[in-house]
Amino acid sequence: MNFKSVTGLIGLLLLLGFLLPPALKLKEIALIVVILIGVAMAAYEFIESLRNQDD
């Protein structure tokens, strides 16, 4: 694995670690949906950046 993929995975894990505690504590469905959308967008951007090997 190259540096770009490792740092991207670390970033996704840090994002989940930052957003997960409020979602588990508050247990609001709307908040969980917004968090899932944000994590899905970040994961999609990560996958697209790995596919695009221009640099």
Image (spheres, rainbow, N blue to C red):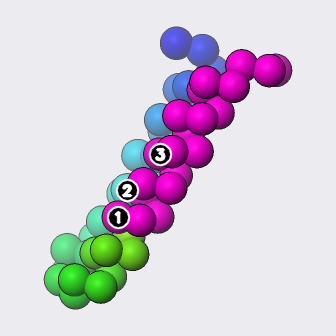
What residue type is disc 3 on?
A: Ala
Residue at point 31% right, 74% down?
Answer: 33
Disc 1 to disc 2, C-alpha distance: 10 Å
Callout 2: SS: helix
Check the image and report above or below for 24 versus 42.
Answer: below
Residue to which mark 3 is pinned: 43
How crowded pointer 3 is (Cα within 10 Å; few <14, some 14-19, many 20+) is rated as some
User: Around disc 2, counting alpha carbons within 10 Å, would you say few (fewer than 14), some (14 to 19), or many (20 or more)?
Assistant: some
Q: Position of residue 44 (x, y in %)?
A: 51, 45
Q: Earlier in the sequence, mark 3 or mark 2?
A: 2
Q: Which one is earlier in the sequence, the residue at label 1 or at label 3?
A: 1
Q: Earlier in the sequence, mark 1 or mark 2?
A: 2
- Say which amino acid is labelled 2: Leu
- Between residue 28 and residue 41, name the one nearer to us: 41
Which region shows up in magenta? 36-55
For residue 5, side relative to residue 22 (left or right): right
Residue that carries the numbered disc 2 in the rendered image: 16
Q: Residues within 10 Å of mark 1 (few under 14, many from 20)?
A: some
Please give the name of the residue rendered at 43% of the width and 57% of the height, measured from the top-left corner: 39
Residue under label 1, please give it: 36
Amino acid of disc 1: Leu
